[in-house]
Structures are given as C-alpha cells and as structure tokens.
Image (tube, coloured by chain):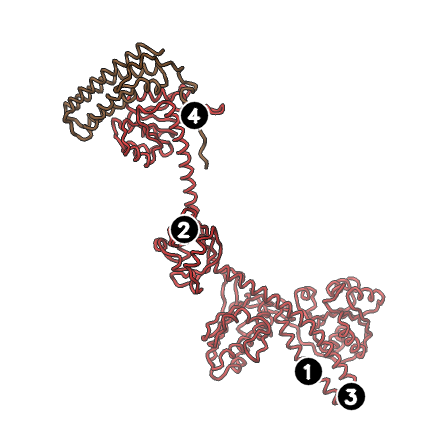
Chain colours: A brown, B red
Amino acid sequence: MAPQKQEFPESKHGIMAAVPQTFNPDWHALRSERFDPVSLWERLGEDLELLTELVEILMLEGPATLEQIKTAIEGNDADALSKAAHRLKGSVLQFSAITASAKAAELETMGRKNSLTGANELFQQLQFEIGWLIKTLKTMLASGPA
Amino acid sequence: MSTSVIESQQVKTFRVLLVEDNPLDVRLVLRLLEPLNQGVPCRHVTRLSDALTELNREKFDVVLLDLNLDDSNGFDTFLAVREAATSAAILVLSGSESVELAIRTVREGAQDYLVKGSFDQKLLLRAIQYALERKASEDALRKSEATVRAIFESSLDGILIWDDNCDCLQANAAAAALIGVPREELLGTSVCSFAGVGLNIDVRAEWNKIRDCDSARGQLWIERSDGGRRLFDYSFKSNIQPGKHLGVVRDITEQQSLEEQLRQSQKMEAVGRLAGGVAHDFNNILGVITGYAELMMMNTLEAEQHKKAEQIISAAEKAAALTNQLLAFGRKQVIAPRLINVADVVSGLKSMITCLMSAETETVLDLKEPLKMVNADQSQLEQVVLNLTTNARQAMPAGGKLTVTIDEIENQAGGLMPDGHYVRLTVTDTGIGIETEHLSRIFEPFFSTKPTGTGLGLSTVYGIVKQSGGFVTVDTDLGHGSTFRVYLPAVEGSSPQVQTNPAVKPSASDGSGTILLVDDEDRLREAVREYLEIRGYKIITARNGQEAVEVAEACPGIDLMITDVTMPRMNGRRLVEHMRKARPAMKILVMSGYADDEKVRMGFLELESFVQKPFSFQALSAKVYALLHPDAP
C-alpha cells in the first residue's frame, strides 16, 4: 500500500501563523558569542508575541530551575543536578543563548558522571549567564521590532 | 484532541501527542504547531505515565517526545512510548546533542531526532510530514512483508531462496516436507546434495547455468532423505535480491505417473480402434471365403473337392479366431456379460492351469470367496486367466512359483481408476521379469519379446478387462518376477443384466419366404444371397439403408430383413428404427462384427435377432429358418 501523501502548510504562511514583524537593526548590537538574536528571531518566526511569552516563562522557570541546581549541588545530588541542568539547557537553547546552554550542559555532564568538583563555580557562571540573558531579552522586547 | 491541515480544500486530521515537561518548550512547540491545528491545541502531557495512559486510550498519528521527564529518562522513555504507540510516528525533541542517542533512537524506530534550539516552525512541520510519510511507508512495507510471509509459510509449493553458491538461505515448511528433511537441516545445505540423482548430470554446472539466466523453468529429480525419488517441477528467478535466487518447486511425481498412464491408455485406445477396424474388415472377407466354400460344398459331389472346401472353411475359422482376439483387444467382441463369481471361474480352470505349468513350477491358488460378483463374460474372463497364467509360465522357463489370488479392495486413491469396490485377480510369477523399456508396450497387440509369440495374449487381456469396465496393472522386478493385477468393478445384487446367448442349433431345413438382404459388402451380400436362394428363400438385396427403404416400399411382401449395421448413407440402426415403425410385422436379423453399445441398445443380442460376423452360412440359415418358421419343431 502506497503511503498517503500529506501536505503541510509552510510554516508562517499557514492560516494561523502570526503576522511577521521586522527585525530591529538595534538588536544587532546584542549579537555576541553568548547570544544570537538573529537566529532567535528567525526561529520564532519573527513573532514578537511568542518571544514575549517565552521570555515571561524563562523569567519564571529560569530562577526556579537555578534554585534546583543549587540545591542539588549543595546536597551532592548528581542525578537531580543532571536533570535540572538538562532542563535549563533545553530552555536557554531555545533562546540561542550559546554560553548559557554550554554552562548548563557542563553541569549536566557533571551530574551524569557524578563528578561535582567545580560545580559551584560553574553554577555561579551559569547564574550570571541566565541573569544576563534575561536582561538582554528584556532589552529586545523593550525596543521592539522595527 | 485533533489537529488538522488544509490540503486541496479538504481538512485532514492528525492526532498529535506532545510529551514535554518544560513549560517553555511546551509553549514554543504548541505555537509552532498552530498552522496545523486551526486553533485546536494538540494533546500535551508532562509525564511518561500520563503519556502511556493517553496512548492506551487514544490512537495518535504523531508523538513529539522529550526523553527526559520527571518519571523517566533517556532511551528508556523512548522504548516505553514505542511499545505503546505502535501506530504513531515518534519524533524525539531533545535537549541533548548526543549523536549516539540520536542514532540509537532512530535505529530503534524513531522517525526523527530534533535538538531543541535547532528547529524553527518550518523545519518542525516538515519533519512531522516526512515522519508521517515514512511511518506510512514502513507500515505498508510491514503489511506487505506479513502478506509475503504468510504466503511463504502457507504455500503448498516448496519455496526456497539460495545464494550464489547454491546454498539454501530460506525454505518454507512445504519445501522441507517435499524434500524430506527438517527445515533447520535444509538451511545452509546445497541443492546439489539432493537434486539430479541418478541422472548422471553435473548438478553444479546445471546450477551455474540456471543461475546466470534471468528465469528458468524445468523439472528435476530429488532424492529424499528416506531414499524416495520425486520428480519436481521448478520455476527459478535469479537475483530477486543481489546474490539471492528464488526457486519454487512442486512435486509432480503422481501427476507425471497419471499423465503417463493416460497417454498409455489413449495409445491403447487408438491401437484398439485400429485393430477392431481391421478385424471387422477382415471378418467380412472371411465371411465371403467361408460362404463360397460352403456353396462349393453344397454344389459339388466330388469327394476331393468337398475335402478341399472343408480345408478352406477350417483355415477361415482359424483366421476368424485370430480376428476374434483382435476384436477382444479392441473391445469390439460380442459378449454376453452376466453376474459371475470370479473365484468360481478360476476354480473351474484349476486343472487347466496346473497342466499349463511345468513340473518345476509350484502353483498356489489363493481364492478367497469374494463377497461381491462382477458383471463380465465368463468365457472372456476364462481367457484372461489363461492368458495371464500362460504368460507367467513362459516367464518361468526353469520353473518357479505361480500364485493366483482373488480378493476385494476398496479404491479410494483416485487416479485413473475410479474410487469404488473392486474384485482383484492377481497373478504373480517368480520369473524373469519385464525390461523397463518393454513395460509401456506389453499390452500393445503384436508386441512380443518371444520369438514365437503372437503378441496378442496380454493385448487380449487388456481389451477384455477394459470391455468389462476394469483395469489392469503390472509390477515387475527384473530377474525376480512380475505381478499382474486385474481390477473388476464389484456389483451388488445377483441378477444378470444380459442373459447368456444359448448356442444356436443349426438347421439345414429348407425354408420359404421373402428376405430383404442389406449389406454394403458386395461379395458377402452376393454369397449370402446365393446360399439362401439355394435354401429356398426369395432374396431381394440392397446396398445400404436408404436403398433398403426404397426397395421395401416397392415390395410389400417382405417377411424378414437381414441387415448389416455399419453402412453408408443410412446405417443399420436408423434402418431398423424405420422398419420397426413402417413394417412392424416384418422380422429383423442384424449381422455385425461389432458388439459396441449401439448394438446392445438396439436390442439385437437376443437369441434369434443377431448373428456375429464371421458366421457360417449354415448357422445363418438356421437363424433365418427359426425366425420365419417359429412354430417349426
């Protein structure tokens, strides 16, 4: 039996897609090795509403997850560390936060390998990166698209 | 919950389950999927246990799966979902960029592995689309494979797959059964180890030749593990996959045997028709010779000439006996079948059989009293027994053992012999046996391996048995002897279907009356006319049925019509039917060398109405007299 051909609408041109908005040239200034606002804007389909929602979630979930990581490190709970770091890594990956996701990945690996030496310093760095990311994203939202 | 897409003005619905515990990822993915679902969100759960519940409750088309959940982690998550979501396409959405994990999940059935942060809406939707298509293809392939597997396993034909080296890679149950080895033993075994036995051929070379063909069909002999040889029809298709070759085999041993029996039967039928035809014509000639010899005896007073005429008649009678055997083979002999006990017939011949055997031969008659009778001509059956025992005697020039048995069998094996009850006459000798190349010809007339044989003994047996509705078989073991088996259909009841014709006592009395004589054989017709005229009858002749009708219309005072059966223009059967209506008072006497069904249906086998060619004119005259003078003493 031949498989049924199933056509999908093309992403943002679908009937429910948000109206695309234009990238704000000021955002280029935010681009660095730590963060890629161009990639983020494109992946979210140039959807400010969605970006706003995601940032709001990050502002809620990010500190909470950081707290879980901190607790896991303090309790020497490698498994909890691995899970929480993995979760935060996934979240910041969606924001094209390169450095933050790398730090989270390192902590996840530490947890998986049950080797928490240096985890506190790494946590500090991650906490800083998350703070920086939220601040940067707020800046993006404040300036808005062009 | 359903999602849908627009395609050619038609809404297609896809049921999507998102298994994700990260609120941020959930919001993102649901938003990216919005073009699919027309505002209706897909089903979303955060735990594996909830996912399994949903999958057990509802059938989903797509599962978007994060591997790291509160209650499950990594590859185990995937295995659990795969188990429950057999009909869904599973796409892994992972925060892990582990290539190893990606390969492992895809190899084990995930349709795709997407790393978070690396896909946008376009990529996600396309991945889902491709996943659905791949899943549909895989399902179709799986169904097709299941169908092929079912055919493979349930086929009555043997199906085998070989590699280039002729070693068996796969075989179905039928193949193993046909070849007579367990399937496990067949696998890895070369076909060369059991094919082509006794054929003195290089099976390996044959295999290489066949393998290089695109396809081939043929037959080959197989030697089974039990030593039995079977003939297979095979069809072969090379390279159904590179280096894999398909063979389908069917055991046609029985079919081949039946076909050979049928061919032999048809050949014998044709030879029988030919022999019967020759005998018929020959009988007409013998009738003329006998008739004129009898006329000579009537017309001459010289003793020397009388004696010579007697010699002519004697020689003609011997020739008639020979043609009678040909008629028996051709099943054209006039018979008088009745219900008889075969054991009684053989018992009656016991002394004769013993006399036939040499002093060095032990004769054993094992005559179990059959419960059932057979419908046959007793004299013919006697001839069958004598011919078979004579044959056995000749096969044992240095003596041996002759065994004649009678029993009953129930045939349920099908084949050329219909199922049913048979009385079986078996004649076994311990003689020289029959050469294989002679076996197919021993029932042919004039075929003989003996310098002095007529070649009519077994052909007569064959004809008589066939005429009696029976079958004859032979088994032989060269140097050890032969066994002939005659199967005659058993008949329930005891009343004969046709009464025996008592012998006609010839009368030399001169008679009177007008006779219409109809025969297309001019010389025989003239001889009979001359003889009957001498006997005092007025004879009118006709050369066929049509002429006889015309003559009869012109001559109302005809008392008796003597007619042949096989004639041009109007045959004897139609002539008799006509005369029975047009001249109901006229007596009718039919003469023929045949005794086929047509004659029997005409009802001429009763005492006074039929005379078999060749006949003596004296006997004919007696029948004529009896018909025209029924009240005479």
Q: Is residue B367 visible?
A: no
Residue at image mark 1: B314
Where residue B557 appears, as percent x and y from the top left, is 84, 69
Determine the residue located farthest toward the top in the rendered image: A142
User: Does B272 sit left or right of B578 as displayed?
Assistant: left
Label 1: state its secondary structure. Answer: helix
Badge 3: few (under 14), some or many (20 or more) residues near its Cα, within 10 Å? few
Q: Are marks 1 and 3 on the same chain?
A: yes
Q: Are marks 2 and 4 on the same chain?
A: no
Q: CA distance from mark 1 to mark 3?
A: 19 Å
Q: Nearer the viewer, residue A51 or B553?
A: A51
Q: CA distance from mark 2 to mark 1?
A: 74 Å
Foreground tag (4 vs 1): 4
Q: Amino acid at mark 1?
A: Ser
Where residue A25 appears, as percent x and y from the top left, is 34, 13
Q: CA distance from mark 2 to mark 3?
A: 92 Å
Q: Is residue B305 placed above or below B495 in the rendered structure?
A: below
Q: Which one is earlier in the sequence, the residue at label 1 or at label 3?
A: 3
Residue A1's disc is: none
Residue at image mark 4: A8
**Tag 4 subunit:** A
Q: Which one is earlier in the sequence, the residue at label 2 or at label 3?
A: 2
Foreground tag (2 vs 1): 2
Q: Amino acid at mark 2?
A: Ile
Q: CA distance from mark 2 to mark 4?
A: 43 Å
Residue at image mark 2: B161
Foreground tag (2 vs 3): 2
Residue at image mark 3: B301
Q: Amino acid at mark 4?
A: Phe
Q: Nearer the viewer, residue B610 or B371?
A: B610
**Tag 3 subunit:** B
